[in-house]
Structure formats: structure tokens, C-alpha cells
Image (cartoon, coloured by chain):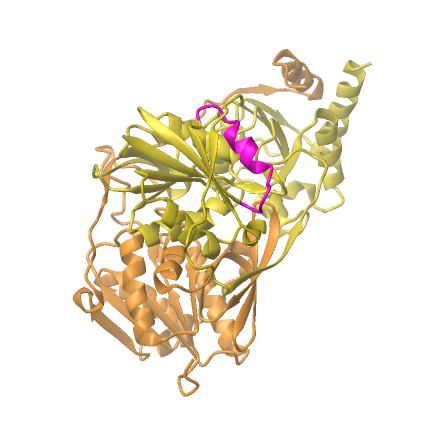
Chain colours: A yellow, B orange
Amino acid sequence: MTQVLVIAEHANGKLNASTAKCVKAASTLAGSEVVVAVFATPGSPVVAQAAGIAGVTRVIEVAHAVHEHALAATLAPQVAEISAPFSHVFGPSTTFGKDLMPRVAALLDAPQISDVMSIESATRFRRPIYAGNAITTVEVAAGTKIVATIRTASFEAAATGGSAKVESVSPGSALPTHTRFVSLAAAGSDRPDLQSANKVISGGRALASADAFKLIYGLADKIGAAVGASRAAVDAGYVPSDMQVGQTGKIIAPELYIAIGISGAIQHLTGIKDARTIVAINKDSEAPIFEVADIGLVGDLFTIVPELEKLIDASRK
Amino acid sequence: MDSSQPRRILVAIKRVVDYNVRIRVKPDGSGVVLDGVKLSINPFDAIAIEEALRIKESGRADEVVVATIGPADCQATLRNALAMGAQRALHVVADASGEPLSIARILLKLVEREQPFLVILGKQAIDDDNNQTGQMLAALWDRPQATFASKLELTETTAKVTREVDAGLETLEVDLPAVITTDLRLNEPRFVKLPEIMKAKTKPLASIPLADVGGAGTARVKMIKTEPPPGRQRGIMVKDTAELFAELSKRGLV
């Protein structure tokens, strides 16, 4: 029997969309029982949200004040403890899961498969290596407990409408005091979340200043898009690092991705290649971004973006 | 910690295909082409070395020791790290690189020998992209981890680390000793100058047989095949903004 434990990611009383994607991935395993573990403060609304994901058979609630902030060092021994009956332990391939899951794997003496993009069987997985320039299929011997992080851009979210039963447990693992949360400086924005948005508009080095990014924000707000950036734009200080799209930033799979003034370095393309439609606006017709773009336009972004905004405005009158 | 011990930082590095190399998958699916390809220090590990050197230069550490696990010719990679400014190098001689958990076990043995107050590693190697070893070492060592660091401030007994997370910048305080993994924006590694390359040739580099650090461990993840990624088709070019807008409208995207 394949039993999968999915570690829920959440913040501020809201379940992260990555959890439903992990559930979807877990559900593709034949005959699997999918259990979601929620480590949260007592009374957290996240428990009910997890129980509402279709395909979840049970939710394990671990309620403790210490879980106000997710700390890998605190969570890992507890996750390892409740993982005992499970054949697979899944977490999202987000910074939360990337931080936590290897620590869990080491405590369980289990191999970890990182960034799973497809599941061939209970023991066989496909994952990207070399920044997505190669895809490798790996196999783990049957009977080995497997820890995995699930590449969220590769799986759709499981639907809602489930009603899993909730079980509360209190693991006995000692809570370490050697790691303490100090602060979180969130960019704080009313725009859609970059990781889960349907539409994303990113700006690159060609914007040439933080101020010019207003152009990108303006267009994004017009069509309800999240805003991202290339590594060059982040390194140049135009926008904060949490907006970086690419192999070392966020890997996203929106319906629409508009790359403005982005040349399309390999590491950026790795982060967007699962987007449904890629639009590129760049003044250099040789820019590599055009090799992957569904719609390309060569020209000056400082002219094109305002024109595009006007056309959108006009179409809504 | 024993105050008579030098304050030591251990930096674990990996030799990988240089980030400028265009990766080609072997036609038989057995892996990527490595013959005749330029190999370099994993870029995140170069950042780890740089950070350790800066800590030493600020007076908060006495010694920077670099370590790697791999075949004989990995020594060139260690010499490079010595040329950057590390004092000593450890080379665990192994045929292949090994799975992250096996590597973490070997590193734990080195940690037990060297008693560092800080271990710094790259957050991931740009070949396997596993992003596991640092976290696994921290777990086995039962010490704190601060991954994806973009800023590091030390006191005698703690490290305050700013981490690049999806939600923004998270700051943690961890007790020492601890494991730190580096993100891109932690620093910019220095260039190595010729005199330092000469000097590095005389710095101590110890070869350690694999058997002395617990052996290779069991490989449990078997590579079945490696393929090139599915390519995206080049789409259409439009000639102006009006055409772009028309195309987006037609596809229901604006």
C-alpha cells in the first residue's frame, strides 16, 4: 500500500497553493492514501483548508505555538516522527520544502528526490538537472522510504470539495531552541502572488532603473498580473530579490507570461518554460527569449508598453 | 566550545561542469557529455569560500579549511580554493561524487575531526541541482541550519542570517556551531591573482582515503536515463503593438 504524507505549507492562516499540488502529485501514485500534515498554531484555519482538498483521506494536525513560524530545525524531527507508517513523504519544491525536506530525509535515513516533475511509478521519478538542460529519470529500490520535493510548476492543484477527517497528534520529539525566528521582510503587495498567478509580467535589465519598473506595474495592474523580474534586474537593484523568476528564483507556470526587456538567459528560461503562452518584447531581435516566445515583438519597450496599455483601455470602453 | 581551539570554518565545495558550458545530453541517454568539458568550482560554493574568507579577514575566524569529495583531479579545484585564500584543504578521494546523504555523512566525519564553529556550503550544485547536502549535514550533526543565506552577521556564539525565501527576506538567529548554505547575493567571490596561485601550491592539502571517513555509503537512487528537455516551439513575430494586442485578444489573454 502506497501511503503518502504531504507536509502542508502555509502562512498567515492560509494554505499555500503548493500543498494542493503536492496532493495532486501524490494522487497519481496508484492506490495511494494521501495524508496531509499541518503543523500550525492551535486553532489554525489551515487544518480545515487542508481537509477540504479533494483526494485527501486524512489530515494530521500538529498544533503548537512553536509552529507560528515554520523552522526546518523544529519541524524536521516531528515530521520524521510522524512519517513512520508512510512509504513516501512529499513537500513542495518551494523555499519552505527545499529547506525542510532534506533535513527530514537525513533523519529518516531516506534518499530524497528533489524537484519531481513527473511520477512514473511509486519508485520512479523524472526531475530536471543542469538547470533544466537535461531531464533525468531515477529509480529507488522498492521498499525504500522516499522523501521528495514536488516541482509545483509541473502539477495542477488538486480540486477543493474534500472532507477528510482530522486527527490531532502531539509528537514527543524535543523542540530545539538553537534556531530562532527574528523577522520576515515581505515585499507586501496587493498584486497577485507571483508563484501562483495566472498572468505574470516580468521586467529585465532594459528597464534601466527602479523607477522605470512603474511601467511594468502599471501594465500588470491593468490585466491583473503579478510582477516578476530577471536576475539582472534584481542584481541591478531595480526590484527586491523575491521577484526574481528563474532557476535560482521562482519557477512559475502561468497562463500568460510577458517578458519585457529580458534577453532570456538560460537560467531565466528554466523558470518560465512551463508557462502556457510566452510573450517577449525586446529591442534586440537576436535575443534568445524569442526562441521560446509564442508571440514576439521587436521594439522599444518604452514605446510599446504605453501603447499596449492604451489599446487595453480602449478595448474596455 | 573549547577556547583553546582555533576558530575554524569548514567550507565544502564541489567540482561541477562550468556554468558557461552548454550542456549536451549523450545520445544513448546515459547522462550528459562530460568529456573535454571545462570543470570549475560550483558557483554557490565559490560564494561560500568568499564568505568564509571575509569572516576570517574580519577577525571572527582563525582558519578557513576547504574540503571536497571526488576523484584525484579534484585537487585542482581545491588548489583554486587555496589560491582564493583558504589555509588548508582536505580531499576525500572517491571515484564518483555520491548521493547527498552519503556526502553529508562524510562531511560529518570531517566536522568531527575539524570541530568548526561554522560550516558553509553552496545551497545547491549546478549539476544535480539537489539542494540537499547542507540541510542533511545539519540534521546528522544535530545543529541549526540557515539555508539560502543572503546576509550573515556573527557574534561569538550566534549567527544572524538573512535568507532568501519565497515570501521575501527571512532573518533567523542560530546558535553556533551551525550550517549555512549560500544564495547568489551573499557576496561576489574575488578573482584569484597569479601570486596567490603560486602560493597555493605550497599550502597543505591532505588526501583522506574514503575508508577513513566511513566509506562511500550505499547508492539508492539509480539513474535510468537522461534526456534533453522538450523544446518549446518558436512562435510568431508580430510587427507592432496593435498586432500584439490583436493576437493577445484573439487568444483571450487580455
Residue farthest right in this picture = A317
Please state the total of marks drawn on the protein image: 0
Which quadrant of the structure image shows residue B115? Answer: bottom left
When the figure is inspected, residue A297 is found, relative to residue A231, above or below; the finding is above
Residue A101 or residue A297, whichever sits in front = A101
Which quadrant of the structure image shows residue A206? Answer: top right
Quadrant that contains the N terminus of chain B:
bottom left
Please indicate, yes or no, whether residue B129 appears anywhere in the rendered image.
Answer: no
Please indicate, yes or no, whether residue B232 appears anywhere in the rendered image.
Answer: yes
Residue B214 or residue B96, whichever sits in front = B214
B144 lies left or right of A309:
left
Quadrant that contains the C terminus of chain B:
top right
Residue farthest bottom in this picture = B4
Residue A247 or residue A133, whichever sits in front = A247
Q: Which residues are magenta?
A: A40-55
Q: Is residue A46 magenta?
A: yes
Q: Give coordinates of residue A263: x percent, y percent.
A: 56, 38
Q: Give coordinates of residue B252: x percent, y percent.
A: 63, 14
Tell me which residue sits at (74%, 41%) in the image.
A212
Tell me which residue sits at (20%, 52%) in the image.
B218
Residue farthest left in this picture = B211
Q: Is residue B194 magenta?
A: no
Q: Give coordinates of residue B119: x percent, y percent.
A: 42, 67
